[in-house]
Amino acid sequence: MKLSLGSEIYVAGHNGMVGSAICRLLEKRGYENLILRTHSELDLTKQDDVNTFFKKEKPDVVFLAAAKVGGINANMNNQSAFLMDNIGIEYNVINAAFNNDVDNLMFLGSSCIYPRESKQPIKEDYLLTGPLEPTNEGYALSKIVGLKACQYYNEQYGTNYIGVMPTNLYGINDNFDLESSHLVPAIIRKMHEAKINNNPQVEIWGTGKPYRELLYVDDMADATLFAFENYKGKSFINVGTGEDLTIRQISETIKNIVGYEGELYFNTDKPDGMYRKLLDVTNLKNLGWEPKYSLEEGLKITYEWYLNNK
């Protein structure tokens, strides 16, 4: 479906990394009727409040980027909250959208939905073919519930509720809190602080051997709008670069960008997480989409943003 410049567009989670990137892109392309609410203005875990909001605002399109998110440490220590809070958000928004005649919704998922031992690269068809990675199982299950809900609404009611499953994201507005951050922002912050304090080494969790595919968040936003206008399926589509590097290689790249001259200490007492989750992005590529930012370009922009906003 092609978006109209006059469409009333609700971006749930507009202050987050992905939601803010979607807003930046929409505004850049001339969409002015964005419906935005902060968490204090609208708690998406409260069903009555969400229903009241949809009845009043009547959006034409919804981008569901709101979620409780975090890195491996936050996930391991808060499995119940990552499961229940996210299911609550997804249920409330998707159900309220349907009950208020919203036919077009984009659901932002995560590549952690796939089985821990998936064949590589991971095709969309591999969903639910094996056990999940234990360290983020709660979050993964919640995202599976959301994308399956979208699929069932499409099959039963003819809606256009599409899921986009991104690989590991990073970029502007990322979370740099070491207690809850993902890989890239955690390493950027650790290395920057070690550089400033002349620390001789920086700790990286795990062996450094697992692979990670990384996508700059503005590319994710571009792919989301592209999929909205071009994907005709009834379920979801992978979004990524189709390339990955080891955590050691990623750490070395960030080290060069930050200008840190100390040593990297890989703490093997800490978990590695999923060994590899390279996405098969053939379906999106065949539709004509490819990322614009190289890893080094995206990391440089992210580090500069961190320096200006830390």
Image (cartoon, rainbow, N blue to C red):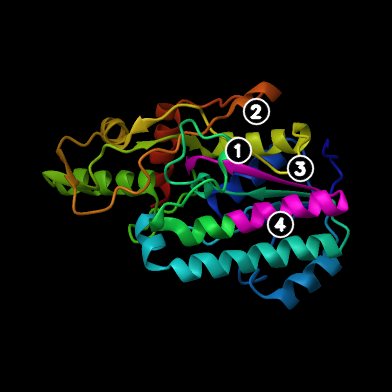
Residue depicted at x 40% and y 33%? 300
Question: Which amino acid type corresponds to the residue marked 3 in the rendered image?
Answer: Lys
For numbered disc 1, what is the local secondary structure? Answer: helix
In the rendered image, which residue does mark 4 sit on? Answer: 149
**Residues packed near mark 2 inside 10 Å, few (<14), some (14 to 19) or many (20 plus):** some
Q: For mark 2, what is the residue?
A: 283
**Mark toward the start of the polypeptide (2 vs 4):** 4
Question: Looking at the rendered structure, which numbered label has been put on residue 124?
Answer: 1
For marks 1 and 3, the one nearer the N-term is 1
Given residues 261 and 212, the one toward you in this image is 212
In primary-sequence order, the first of circles 3 and 2 is 3
Mark 4 and mark 1 in contact (Cβ < 8 Å)?
A: no
Left or right: 8 in relation to 115: right
C-alpha distance separating marks 1 and 2: 9 Å
Q: Earlier in the sequence, mark 3 or mark 4?
A: 4
- Which residue is tagged 3? 234
How far across and how far down the image is residue 12, in percent? 67, 57
Mark 3 near mark 2, Cβ–Cβ under 8 Å?
no
- The picture places residue 120, in percent across and down from the top left corner, at 46, 31
Of the numbered discs 1 and 4, the one sitting upstream in the chain is: 1
Q: Is residue 145 above or below residue 273?
A: below
User: Disc 1, disc 2: CB below 8 Å?
Assistant: yes
Name the one closer to the observer, 69 or 216.
Answer: 69
Q: Secondary structure at mark 3?
A: loop
Task: Note whether 72 is above or below 252 in the view shown.
Answer: below
Quick check: is 155 in the magenta stretch?
A: yes
Above/below status of 127 relative to 242 = below
Q: Nearer the viewer, residue 283 or 49?
A: 283
